[in-house]
Amino acid sequence: MTFNWFKFASPASFYPLAGRLIRSFWILTGVLLVIGLYWGFFQTADQLGGSNPQKEYYRIIFIHVPAAWMSMWLYIVLVFWAAIGLVFNTRLSFMMANAVAPTGAVFTFLALWTGAFWGRPSWGTYWDWDPRLTSELVLFFMYIGYIALHSAIDDTRRADRASALLAIVGLVMVPVIYWSINCPDPTQCAALHQRSGLGKIDTNILFSMLTMTLAFWMYSFATSLMRLRSIILTREAEASWVQELVSQEHPQ
Amino acid sequence: MWAVFWCVLKRDLLLALRRRTDVLTTLFFFIIVVSLFPLGVGTERQVLQILGPGVVWVAALLASMLALERLFAADYEDGTLEQMLLTAQPLSLLVLAKISAHWLLTGLPLVLIAPLVGMQYHLSDTQIGVMLLALLLGTPILSLIGAIGAALTLGLRGGGILLALLILPLYIPVLVYGAGAVEVSRIALADTEPYLLLLSAFLLAALTLAPLAAAAALRISLE
């Protein structure tokens, strides 16, 4: 049996597939969100800080950590599609990179925002120049730069390729930037690392956190595919299959 | 192959020396920004000593970024750039020559004026020396990374402000270690070595990778 991998690389054949996928991704998002939030609020230890009820705010991590993880992961996804687009010259890959970017930017912003709410009760300040916070802020700038460059160029082909190159340059620079923020003093780097690991987290909290991460992931799929469908329609507006689609839905 | 490098370098230098104001504006921008800070934050000696390294570096970042807009713009407008793309010589080498000329015209003057600026902030002699060295290593990196952004935003409306948005986040490592070296030299000169070594490493990496990326960006922009 031969399977044509490139069949769905054509916008015309991917458009209906995306339409079918979006519904299941939304359902998955809903179900996982409900499970994750329920578990996070009712099945985890009530007072993590012993007798101190103020520590209840730790439940922010069920939004904060998954959002931060997704913000980083989506940048890698973005660069992946941008690179595929540059190498294989496939239009759909650029559209995919383009569709992922706003969702990634939103998650980065969400991580920063919830981080501020976390910082206020636990550190006594909304913002601190903690390495993790600063790197997340830089990541946000990268997303904004990508989106800004893409929307500044009118010619779609140039916009796609230029912003793809920018995204790749960004990914090369990310480890260096992260490292430089993490270790402002190159000789004392290790002292700054926060020691944390998934194995040290309470099982209920971990379960809820991972479920929320999956929910956010499914949400990213759903929103990116929806955005992708609009991008396809806008860019292929002249194509005959789009014209047919429109005339079917709006018969004159 | 190096003949073409020298040729482009000489041409760019010659062109710039015929219009000296371009070079001087960048330099004076740097001096003005640095001189405005004490007026804003107060002229207390200790405050200035602490702020000095960071302010000088941020001003250098902004000055070199503002100058970047002109890196390819003139050649783009009169069509020279298109001819460069068509030559049989490797484009990244031509780009490297242009970047070198650009650094000699906008980066090097900043480095040379830095001691004067350091005195404005009451930095000690060792600190000024370290700052000179750090700027000497750091400003070429700014020109190299910036060239990628300049190539990407070539001929766009609002190119300058867009360039800032794209490039400034990428300047962070240079800023951190460049200012860090000067800061550390206040306490012990020996401690600056890792900073300067890291800056040198960044310079070598940027020297090999950035011209390639900038050349690719130029091809995309001029397609």
Image (cartoon, rainbow, N blue to C red):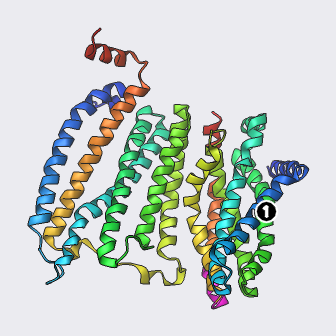
Residue B216 can be seen, yes or no: no
The amino acid type of the residue labelled 1 equals Phe
Q: To which quarter of the image does residue A203 belong?
A: bottom left
Residue B207 in percent (x, y) is at: 67, 60
Q: Position of residue A229 (x, y in %)?
A: 33, 32
Residue located at (84% from left, 50% from top): B3
Instruction: Verify whether residue A110 appears in magenta.
Output: no
Q: Is residue B55 visible?
A: yes
Q: Is residue B24 above or below residue B159?
A: below
Picture residue at 38% right of the left edge, 15% below the top = A240
Q: Over which residues does the magenta segment extend?
A: B187-197
**Residue ID for mark 1:** B28
Q: Residue at x 66, y 78 (%)?
A: B52
**Dot 1: chain letter:** B
Question: Residue B105 in the image: x percent, y percent?
Answer: 81, 58
Count of marks overlaid on the render: 1
In the picture provided, is A202 more to the left or to the right than A246? left
Give coordinates of residue A37: x percent, y percent. Answer: 15, 59
When the figure is inspected, residue A85 is found, relative to residue B50, above or below; the finding is above
Q: Residue furthest top?
A: A252
